[in-house]
Image (cartoon, rainbow, N blue to C red):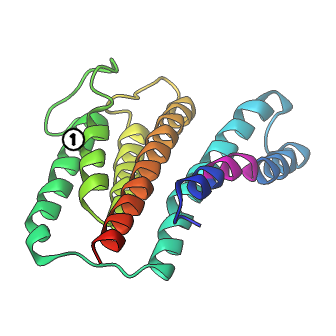
Amino acid sequence: PFSKSSNTFLFFLIALVVPIVSATIGVSSLVLGGFSPVENFLFIWLTWWIGDIMGLILVFPLVNVLKHNKFFIKKEQFPELILAFIVLALIVSTLFLGWPIQTSTNYHFIFLCLLQLLWIAFRFDIVLVLLALDMTYIISVLGTLRFSGIFSLASANMAIIVLDIYLFVVTATIFLVSVTVMNYKRRARYKNK
């Protein structure tokens, strides 16, 4: 399903709709079972829905691409790959963990990781792009739950909602760019034969 940009875009649209059912059933069960007050329904539903979306767009593509694509990296690209992931880890750690330097909670630097992810999307296989996106997600969630970094808000729940919305936009953008680049490279190889 990720061989064309149009299919990838459709996947992201479907990923927004499908979790509505699970979020509604799950939160309704919590309220009807007396585990959560009715007043919190919308807030819990939003958290559940966004969490399901992020799980879907971060796990399904990676599993699908690993299953259907041959993963390869050229030997001469390996040092660049290591450098790209180290730089990405440093940027994301700085933004979301406050390491090695603490950033303010102003959002001035929030899109720095986009540049690094674009580098990876243009230079490497889609599997590595998906691994970079998953690494970004894991580090940013850990930092946000520790109340450090850019999305430090008074409520951990609201911080995760804001973070997931931001990461959805980043993931969709980088993934669509990666699929487009992959198709361009495939066409260029086909024309050169």
Q: Is residue 150 above or below residue 30?
A: above
The answer to which quarter of the image holds residue 193 is bottom left
**What is the span of residues highlighted in magenta in the rendered image?**
12-19
Horizontal and vertical percent for residue 122? 28, 53
Residue type at the position of mark 1:
Ile
Residue drawn at x 78%, y 47% is: 20
Nearest to the observer: residue 96 or residue 67 = 67
Look at mark 1 in the image and give the residue it sits on: 91
In x, y percent, where is residue 13?
Answer: 67, 47
Q: In this view, does 108 lie to the left or right of 56?
A: left
Q: In which quarter of the image is residue 114?
A: top left
130 inside magenta stretch: no
- Return the x and y of residue 88 as percentages of the image width and height: 22, 48
Callout 1: SS: helix
The correct choice, above or below, for 93 with respect to 124 in the image is above
Total marks placed: 1
Q: Quadrant of the N terminus?
A: bottom right
Identify which residue is drawn at 20% across, 29% down: 102
Residue 88 drawn above or below residue 37: below
- Tell me, yes or no, if residue 30 can be seen here: yes
Residue 189 in percent (x, y) is at 31, 71
Residue at 40% in and 27% down: 152
